[in-house]
Image (cartoon, grey):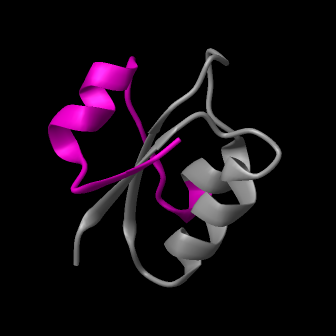
Amino acid sequence: METIGFIGLGIMGAPIAGHLLDAGHTVVASDHRSKPPADLVAKGLKSVTGHNAVAKVADIIIT
């Protein structure tokens, strides 16, 4: 399965990332907040610092 990257976990991004995590996908994200949402981290979200870090590890990027 591909690694899916998110740049931003706002009103739309966070729920989409959550559903992808629930479906068993690997999800990485960078967000302007210092800490990613705790519920997504509990589901397995991998937080990285900066958009370049997302681009380095993700096969698919959602902005």
| Residue at (65% x, 64% y) in the render | 16
Q: Nearer the viewer, residue 42 or 5?
A: 5
Q: Look at the image and give the residue range highlighted in magenta.
A: 42-63
| Residue at (59% x, 56% y) in the render | 42
| Residue at (62% x, 33% y) in the render | 36
Left or right: residue 5 versus residue 44 is left
The extreme bottom residue here reads 23
Q: Nearer the viewer, residue 35 or 29?
A: 29
Residue 33 belongs to the span the image colors magenta? no
Q: Nearer the viewer, residue 25 or 43?
A: 25
Please tell me whether residue 21 is drawn above or below residue 42 in the rendered image.
below
Q: Position of residue 38 (x, y in %)?
A: 69, 44
The extreme right residue here reads 11
| Residue at (70% x, 51% y) in the render | 14
**Quadrant of the snapshot with the N terminus:** bottom left
Left or right: residue 12 versus residue 5 is right
Left or right: residue 45 versus residue 2 is right
User: Which image quadrant is residue 26 in?
Assistant: bottom left
Left or right: residue 36 versus residue 12 is left
Please tell me whether residue 6 is drawn above or below residue 52 in the rendered image.
below
